[in-house]
Amino acid sequence: MKFALPVLFSVLLGACATTAGYEKQLATWVGKNEVELVRGWGPPNQSYEVSGRRFLVYTVTRDVVVPGNAPIPISNSKGKLIAILPGTADTTASSACTTSFELLNARVVSWSHRGDDCTARE
């Protein structure tokens, strides 16, 4: 039960966030200038230029710790301890999202993303 509640909570929260929601948010940046983008997203993790176009790249990583379970004592009907089921260790799940904005003449003209955590609420 100790393991089930955090997982259920994460699933319920995650159900609200979708890739489509993230893409809707990204689409609102098309036409904005570079200064507005940096004000909204902060300094990029990486930037580069190719054929007169500028690319700003943002990468977000996140680690979620899923708590383990304590050992479980097993007793007989008289209350005598007969076994102890081993517990489980905490586990860490990592996720990431890399988003790139393409700029032409200092204006956002397109975007792309990759990763397993490129989601947002719609």
Image (cartoon, helix red, strand yellow):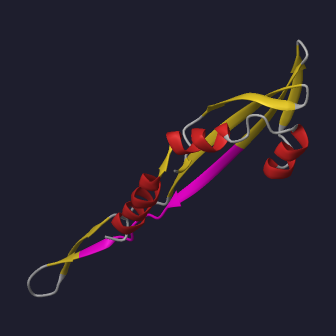
Relative to residue 115, is residue 117 depicted above or below? below
**Which residue appears farthest toward the top when viewing the image?**
51
| Residues in magenta, as a range | 60-73
Quadrant of residue 46 within the rendered picture: top right
- Look at the image and tell me whether residue 89 can be seen: yes
Report the quarter where the N terminus lies: bottom left
- The residue positioned 56% from the left and 56% from the top of the image is 64
Relative to residue 44, is residue 1 depicted above or below? below
Relative to residue 62, is residue 6 depicted above or below? below
Majority secondary structure in the magenta region: strand
Viewer-closest of 41 and 31: 31
Residue 64 left/right relative to 53: left
Asked if residue 105 lies in the magenta stretch, the reply is: no
Residue 1 left/right relative to 27: left
How many badges with numbers are in the image? Answer: 0
Please state the horizontal and vertical placement of residue 66, each as a whole percent of the image.
48, 60
Residue 113 left/right relative to 29: left
Residue 79 left/right relative to 5: left
Quadrant of residue 114 within the rendered picture: top right
Quadrant of residue 55 within the rendered picture: top right
Please state the horizontal and vertical placement of residue 34, each as a whole percent of the image.
88, 38
Please state the horizontal and vertical placement of residue 15, each as a whole percent of the image.
42, 53
Viewer-closest of 87 and 121: 121
- The residue positioned 41% from the left and 64% from the top of the image is 9
**Which residue appears farthest toward the left when viewing the image?**
77
**Which residue appears farthest toward the bottom when viewing the image?**
78
Viewer-closest of 10 and 111: 111
Viewer-closest of 114 and 22: 22
- The residue positioned 52% from the left and 50% from the top of the image is 122
- Look at the image and tell me whether residue 118 can be seen: no
